[in-house]
Image: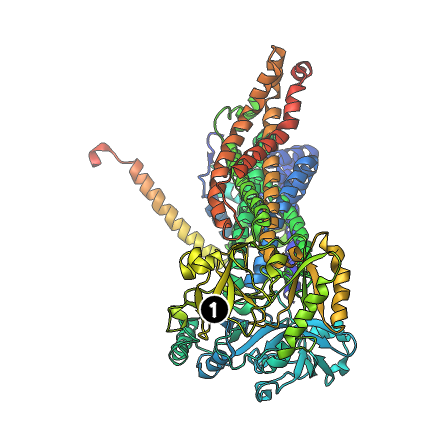
Amino acid sequence: MKLLAYLRSLSAQFFQRSQTEADLEEELNTHIQARADDLERSGLSRAEAERRARIEFGGRERIKEEVRESLGGNFIETMMQDVRYSLRVLRKSPGFTIAAVATLALAIGANSVVFGVLNALILRPLQVPQAQSLYSVEMGSSWHSYPDYLDLRDRNRSFDALAAYAITQVGMDTGGNPSSDWAYETSGNYFDALSLQPYLGRFFHGSDEHGPNSAPFIVLSYSYWHSRFQDDRGVVGRVVRLNKHPFTIIGVAPPEFHGTVLIFAPDFYVPLINEEQVDGENYLNVRGTRWIITILGHLKAGVTPPQAMADLNAIGSYLEKNYPTEDANVRFSLSRPSLVGDLLGRPTRAFVAGLMLLAVLILLAACANLGSLFGARAADRSRELALRLALGSSRIRIVRALFTEAMLISLAGGAAGLWGSVLLLNQLSAWQPFARFPITVPVNPDANVYVVALALALVSGVLFGLVPLRQVLRTDPYQIVKAGRGSADGRRFTVRDLLLVVQIALCAVLVTSSMVAVRGLLRSLSSNFGFEPTNTMVVNADVKMAGYSGERVLPMQRRIIDGLEKVPGVESVGLIDQPPLTMGGSTTIVFTDQTTDLRPSTAAANPYMYEISPEYFRAAGTTLLAGRALSWHDDQNSQRVAVVNREFARKVFGTEAKAVGGYFKRRSGARFQVVGIVEDGKYLTLTEDQRPAMFLPMLQSPSGGTWLVVRSNRDPRQLAPALKSALRDVDAGLPSYIQTWNRAMDGTLFPSRVATVALGVLGVMGAMLSMTGIFGMAAYSVSRRLKELGIRIAIGAQPKEVLQAALGRAFKLLAFGSAAGLILGLLATRVLAAIVYQATPRDPLVLAGVVVAMALLGLVATWIPAQRALSLDPLTLLRED
Amino acid sequence: MSSQAQILPGTLDLLILKAVSLGPLHGYGVLLRIGQISGRALLIEQGALYPALFRLVRQGLLKASWGVSENNRRAKFYELTSAGRKRLREETDGWNRLAAAMGSALAAEPEEL
């Protein structure tokens, strides 16, 4: 309705204006006729009288113009005139127009893509009612245990309700085709705490929980209901099997709800209280095991986050006092739940903010680029502008026309850039980077993105439109019309030169950072992981989904190992509960042998803990440095033993020599003897500081996690079918997933890959921008001095001297800008080191790369202008003009 | 020509208000009336009149309506609004004070100091 009213008022304005216009015309006619009447009375003929009257009256159009201006508010009309004029002018120089629009489209596109990501991941709240008051409770970087959650839920006075959930993979069997799907295990009050209403059926509630395994219910996500059950409304009430246990589907979640972690949408939701059936393990009563990813809830009305934190930390003190062995140094804080609190949130925010900064730099560089182009154009058109001034146009009017040109270009560039970025963002949203995980990056653009892109386009239009302003205001029409081209700017360092230097410096920053990132990624791919992933497959066989638990797990795991070892081409098979760098792993705390007071604050180290089969080190290619590997004799009846990495040996025993044969303790008080030391490696992320790790024999510390590392002497991918059938021979109902180890590390490498691709793209854009900038500058300086160059050639200048005269300045500016940009870039890459593994700015290869790249860019960009300067024919040139 | 004076900047509006205060006039009539009441001493560029007239209408000091001129032509007639009358009074007072002050300043003789 508002829009309608606006249109009506706009049309009224136009209508009235044409009415006024007609009135004015008639009034002026009346005036001239009346004057002519008077003159006729004094004896002139009618025709002569009218002629005299018109002459006396003066320029009628000018008067009309003045009247219009005195009326003011004819903004739209003048603007339409300016727009029409600018379109004509731009159409006359299509090269300039296309270059300018394309430059801006790239810059605005980059900005709106990055802003789209920023908007979707950081600014946009979750799709739940009252998302502003929804917070998650964090305990350092640690997850939560179920008993701690119950204490928080029941003792806090700040939240309307506190819900909790964990993420798990579970075998779903609807009869016939079991699949392994992803679920949130949620507290009973999850949906109520988020104030959601079911799309179909009902949700489970807190009142459904009556002790372990008391609520065998499933709530489907809308998209899973759509893809797996084909929108069948009769699905409510149906009984399906999760890991062989019967569960009843009771409802479907609303379509717009995709769980409370942005990037991880579950297939369905099951009650946490049934953990034993869903996970095969029961930690509901274990306070020391932290597997609940997020505790979240709405703050009560009027409670501020600091008040809530104080309340939570009071509960923390209570926990520390009552459970000193499990809960030490409990510090709660609040964060936003959408990126699993600060765990993903902090690096994501830092990275996206860094990208945004670079994107803004790109935009600034583009503006500098366009600003100098516009300045050059205005200088080229100085004669036209001078003529218009001489003919009585006002300076304001000319500035406005130039400004309109800038705005048209910025709007066209902005629209093109936005269009491209919307395509890209939608593609990104549909992208699933990992086959195994339902991880998506939901970055669909919304109104915010459109508004920001438009605003950026307008602001940059103003920025580069302002550059020729001073030039126009200073123009002296008399001088220019008399002397031909303005001869004012000779060898002085002009604003345009400064813009070019700034732009080249910005681009060099981008090129430097992208080179540092790419180099870092290359290094990270060839660095020492502590194992050798080439020529190995990892096989994840889920024994718990096949219904094995407790005593039956170990024999099954040994049968799998035996089965796989028989496959031809297999060199060795090792079992591990979860291979390093595959987005998982557990840590525990250990104590020196002398420690008697076993509590978290007295722990000697917090190593990663792996349960392995004796063959694992051989299969993984991990080097044993001292002592022995594990063997099948390390079982329940013998001394508990462990193999540790060097970092563990240094941390717990001081030196590696003391470690072999030495003892350490775990929280239970059990003593472990170190029998061997292996090389250090990477365990959770590539960028982590060196962490201690220990490897325990699977016979002494059985675990349900069953990953098999299969090393072969040929391309391991050919083995996959044989491995699959070997597994089927062991147990036909065993869900398994086979991939190369390198592929399994995708998730771990994902952040640095994304960073590298993003920085690489920005670097290429920076390079392109600096190329167009130098090209514009060089082409302009050649075309401006054509006559001078022609004379030089005519009196015998050598090609080298001609080039020196034509392009020396461009090269000087390029060198100056590159040097400045290189230094700035090296300073900036310190920031990158946090994300990109081994991104070090002090890398001679990077330094050389940047210098060579900028020099090449300069060469390419000045090639065409140089050719033009060299091929000048002085005769034709001097004949012209 | 020498007996005619270019009007001072800013005084055109005041002259128009005065001319129109003596009775509704169309544009050309305003010109004639100013010539008449200034004893042909003040010269107004014909074209400059209209921007001023439109400006005064916009400021609400004049109002315009279409009528028929003495020569039977359709013409736009201007008359004062009450705001215009008030403005004329104020500006006239202001002008008189200025003129008196200028007059006495320029008539000053050395012995009066």
Instruction: Give the quadrant of the N terminus of chain A.
Output: bottom right
Instruction: Give the quadrant of the C terminus of chain A.
Output: top right
In the shown orientation, is residue A83 left or right of residue A375?
right
Outermost top residue: A795
Q: Residue at x 40, y 58 (%)?
A: A654
Counting from the top left corner in percent of width and height, residue A479 is at 53, 24
Give, as a three-letter code, the residue at label 1.
Phe
**Position of A669 relative to B64 (above/below):** below
Counting from the top left corner in percent of width and height, residue A163 is at 54, 78
Colour setup of the view: rainbow
Badge 1 is on which residue? A672
Callout 1: 10 Å neighbours few (<14), some, many (20+)?
many
Between residue B40 and residue B104, name the one nearer to us: B104
**Position of A123 relative to A326 (above/below):** above
Counting from the top left corner in percent of width and height, residue A406 is at 60, 42
Whether residue A567 can be seen here: yes
Q: Residue at x 44, y 83 (%)?
A: A155
**Position of A389 relative to A83 (above/below):** above
* Mark 1 belongs to chain: A
**Position of A720 relative to A91 (above/below):** below
Report how many numbered discs are placed on residues in the image. 1
Between residue A105 and residue A559, name the one nearer to us: A559
Counting from the top left corner in percent of width and height, residue A689 is at 48, 55
Rendered image quadrant of residue A742: bottom right
Q: Secondary structure at mark 1?
A: strand
Whether residue B70 can be seen here: no
